[in-house]
Amino acid sequence: MEVLGIDIGGSGMKAAIVDLKTGEFIGKRKRFKTPQPATPEAMMKTVVKLQKHFDWSGPIGCGFPAAIIDGTVKTASNIDKSWIEKPLANMIRKATGCATRVMNDVDVAGLAEMRFGAGKGHDGTVLVLALGTGIGSALFHNQQLMPNTELGHIQFKGDIAEAYAANSIRENEDLSWEVWGKRLNQYLVEVHKLFWPDLIILGGGVSKKFKKYEKHIDSRLNVIPAELKNHAGIVGAACQFL
């Protein structure tokens, strides 16, 4: 089965046709800048541009940076506030004429890692974290997703956790890998107390640099880097049709 996977982010909207047997792209991906302001009307126009680029009439899976319940947007931390309570799945369906499924962007990236990447074959409790501008999360138990966990927003060190341990904080405060790695470890220990995951998978761009901070993470936590890197969002968006 082939699905057009769309990964919507704060700076870019990316898509590719995904072969669900292999988790591989069919052809090249396409990226457009996320319109600013990122209003529903402007972003729907970009979704249609992506559809037309691929001349696509099959199913569309979409990952979106918000909590999603029954295809409807419930939060808006990094997108325009006018998105709240918008029926995203129905909007894409009407704009494209395609069967559509939508979920939180990190939840779909987690789906990809569990199906084709670092979490493949792992039962028990697995936590996938995306370390970037913020900290996104996807929690699985026996391969089943528990959606919309948003663990970057838990209270930690007098603020939300991502204000202390996100990769953007490392960059903005020019933290060494040691200092940031120790911060990240403190956060991971806290999250581990809540769910006792058997495995923690670290995604986001910083997963490529895992060796630089691995030694600062408690070895008892069983932390490994994600495998799919920048493909996870698109592949996972398509995985909603598995």
Image (spheres, grey):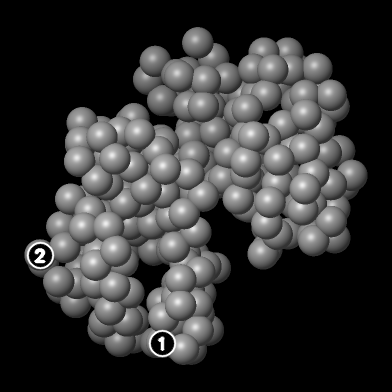
Is 20 situated left or right of 202 in this image?
right
Tell me the tag on residue 220.
Answer: 2
In the image, residue 62 above or below residue 85: above
Q: In this rendering, which labeled residue sits more in front, label 1 or label 2? A: 1
Mark 1 in CB contact with mark 2 (< 8 angstroms)? no
Is 94 situated left or right of 242 in this image?
right
Tell me which residue sits at (80%, 61%) in the image: 81
Label 1, secondary structure: give it.
Answer: loop
Tell me which residue sits at (24%, 72%) in the image: 189
> In the figure, residue 122 lies in which quadrant?
top left
Tell me which residue sits at (67%, 35%) in the image: 71
Label 2, secondary structure: give it.
Answer: helix
Q: Is residue 114 visible?
A: yes
In the image, residue 143 above or below residue 191: above
Task: Name which residue type carries label 1.
Answer: Lys
The residue lying toward the viewer, choosing from 45 and 67, is: 67
Graded by Cα atoms within 10 Å as few (under 14), some (14 to 19) or many (20 or more), the crowding at tag 1 reads: few
Residue under circle 1?
Answer: 157
> In the figure, residue 133 lies in which quadrant?
bottom right
Mark 1 → mark 2, Cα distance in angstroms: 22 Å
Of callouts 1 and 2, the N-terminal one: 1
Tell me which residue sits at (55%, 46%) in the image: 105
* Number of marks in the rendered image: 2
